[in-house]
Amino acid sequence: MRLTHWTDYSLRVLMYCAASEERPQAPTIAEIAQAHDISHSHLTKIVMTLAAHGYLQTTRGRGGGIRLMRSAKDIVIGDVVRLTESDFDMVECFDPEKSRCAMDGSCRLKRVLQTALERYLAVLDDVRLSDLLPPPVRGEHKTARPSWPQITVAR
């Protein structure tokens, strides 16, 4: 299963905010967009969605930014994925209204894939946002940006 960019970016925002919790200045959408090379307007929509569902608190204006509304240890990754993914139909026959498969009803693939999806989500249900954070770097100042490894992505 492949996650959408929406889910990927949602998780990145939450992870960035969690890693920035101790900073006196909340991270901004512009800061996160720049750090991850993501469109500012796209990230704004994601932040608004996460805020509407109680994951983020947003503050406008000077000194504003975004913060987690709940503790990182209380945010279940499976819940975030379910919220942000719009389609868990791995194959056509998952949706009986759209299925044109001649084998539907006698094929065992659908049940195997359904079980795989359930296990996939069960694993994500055991992961908290706090589990995804890098360990603190010794001597790191609390006002510093999150200590993410420098990753170069080929484009």
Image: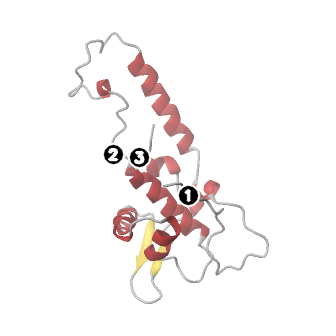
Q: Position of residue 142 (x, y in %)?
A: 67, 79
Say which amino acid is labelled 2. Answer: Ser
Q: Earlier in the sequence, mark 3 or mark 1?
A: 1
Q: Is residue 61 visible?
A: yes
Q: Position of residue 7 (x, y in %)?
A: 43, 52
Q: Is residue 43 above or below residue 7?
A: below
Q: Quadrant of residue 152?
A: bottom right
Q: Residues within 10 Å of mark 1 (few under 14, many from 20)?
A: few
User: For the point 45% across and 63% down, which residue is it?
Assistant: 55
Could you say which is closer to the camera, residue 112 or residue 41? 41
Q: Are marks 2 and 1 in contact (CB under 8 Å)?
A: no
For label 1, the residue is 74
Q: Nearer the viewer, mark 3 or mark 1?
A: 3
Please, is residue 12 above or below residue 83 in the view? Answer: below
Look at the numbered disc 2 and give the secondary structure of its residue: loop
Q: Nearer the viewer, mark 2 or mark 3?
A: 2
Which mark, residue 86?
Answer: 2
On the question of residue 68 being in view, the answer is no
Q: Residue at x 57, y 61 (%)?
A: 72
37 sits left or right of 151 in the view? left
Does the residue at mark 2 contact the one at mark 3 (Cβ under 8 Å)?
Answer: no
Q: Which residue is mark 3?
A: 82
Indicate whether 98 appears above or below 35: above
Q: Residue at x 52, y 32 (%)?
A: 119
Q: Spatial distance from mark 2 to mark 3, Cα to Cα? A: 8 Å
Q: Earlier in the sequence, mark 2 or mark 1?
A: 1
Q: Position of residue 35 (x, y in %)?
A: 53, 69
Name the kind of residue labelled 1 in the image: Asp
Distance (Cα) linking label 2 and label 1 = 23 Å
Type of amino acid at the residue the image marks with label 3 = Arg
